Amino acid sequence: LADARAGLTRRARGRPKEGEEARFGAREVLLRAGVAGRAEEGFASTGLDEILKRVSIPKGSFYYYFKSKEDFGLALIDRYNDVFARRLSNTYEDPERTPLERLYKFVHDAENGMRRYNFERGCLVGNLGQEMGNLPPSFRARLIDVFEDWQRKTAQCIRNAQLNGELPRELDADLAAQFFWIGWEGAVLRAKLERSATPLRLFADGFFRGLKA
Amino acid sequence: LADARAGLTRRARGRPKEGEEARFGAREVLLRAGVAGRAEEGFASTGLDEILKRVSIPKGSFYYYFKSKEDFGLALIDRYNDVFARRLSNTYEDPERTPLERLYKFVHDAENGMRRYNFERGCLVGNLGQEMGNLPPSFRARLIDVFEDWQRKTAQCIRNAQLNGELPRELDADLAAQFFWIGWEGAVLRAKLERSATPLRLFADGFFRGLKA
């Protein structure tokens, strides 16, 4: 979600750190800058030339690693999901917390992540989903898969909270997880628009109230 | 939301009907095609030249009516909201239905509206909100105002359902309306991505269940 570019400090959109290319290679710099940039701005609306110019990587290097802008976009979805799904798993399996506390923790971390980037950086997967009308058709199935993966992980955490007696047994964990991810992407969108955590909190509060009802 | 271009039959993105310009004038054609196109595709990612080419209107005519692409974008938000807020008021004040039935009706109509355009057309205001990173800053306050207007109207309908005994009196109508609009935009996004009504229904079902709990 926000803060996809963990460990890098805030600086101009997608501009690489001094020496980053030497350390990581051009492919890594492109993926890092691409994920950060695409969580902030559109994919279709940002030309490849502009992306390459920002990271000072020549076109030849780009085409050595990626067949096309489309191929690059698919790699960005994979990279974003690798980082994000791992973070989700870490939160949802945190042995220091109860399952319900882990769900709260996710929301709390997401808010901090967005705040760190002044609410300018949203969710790359949500952004691309919104842009589908301008994107290659190959993106559609990939983005749907990613949401389904996040939903499965969230459903499992909800089920653990049910087993633990923290949430009612009657609750349909799969439906609840789908409901969460459908609405949460709306909350990230509004938080970006309003540059405020209020939409995230408002949605999360309503969601958790509903879980317990 | 979907179907912003009520009364026009489905055809290629933003292409005007035969004789539309003669009947309505270039400004009206630009607004109609702009609203329809921008509910499907991005604003930042679609060049002015492309928009004008589709409706066969020369640049000179465009600049006679609009100072800039930004000015055109703000006019599109106003136009979309004029149509949408009127539709919302009609639904929420429908004397044939109880207040709770009116809320159901809105969701039902939105689903039909998206289906009519094969789930390719979403919500112009949600789309622009998602694109804020690429848009002129003047769009931000305008988009926030529009959401607040929709939320106010929805809160009033919820209050009427409370007065009518259809919803619990303890419910905070303003919070519930905010929750709805935050999550609903996420549902429209997912419905577009999946080209399916399922996300809309799933979100609406969960929302209404929460209202009554």
Image: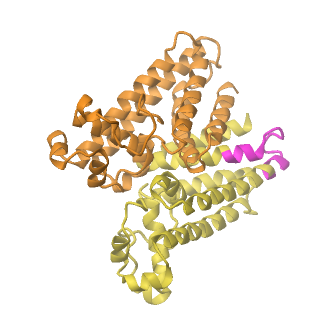
Chain colours: A yellow, B orange
Q: Residue furthest front?
A: B18
Image coords of residue B168 (percent x, y): 65, 19
Q: Is residue A8 visible?
A: no
Task: Tell me if B30 is positioned left or right of A175 in this view.
Answer: left
Residue A192 painted magenta: no
Point 48% across, 48% down: residue: A189
Q: Is residue A175 above or below residue A146?
A: above
Q: Which residues are magenta?
A: A160-178
Q: Is residue A200 above or below residue B28?
A: below
Disc count in the image?
A: 0
Image coords of residue A207 (percent x, y): 64, 40
Image coords of residue A35 (percent x, y): 49, 68
Point 33% across, 42% down: residue: B34
> Between B15 and B164, which is closer to the camera in this rendering?
B15
Q: Is residue B14 above or below residue B9?
A: below
The image quadrant of residue B78 is top left
Point 41% across, 87% down: residue: A19
Q: Residue furthest bottom?
A: A22
Image coords of residue B203 (percent x, y): 63, 38
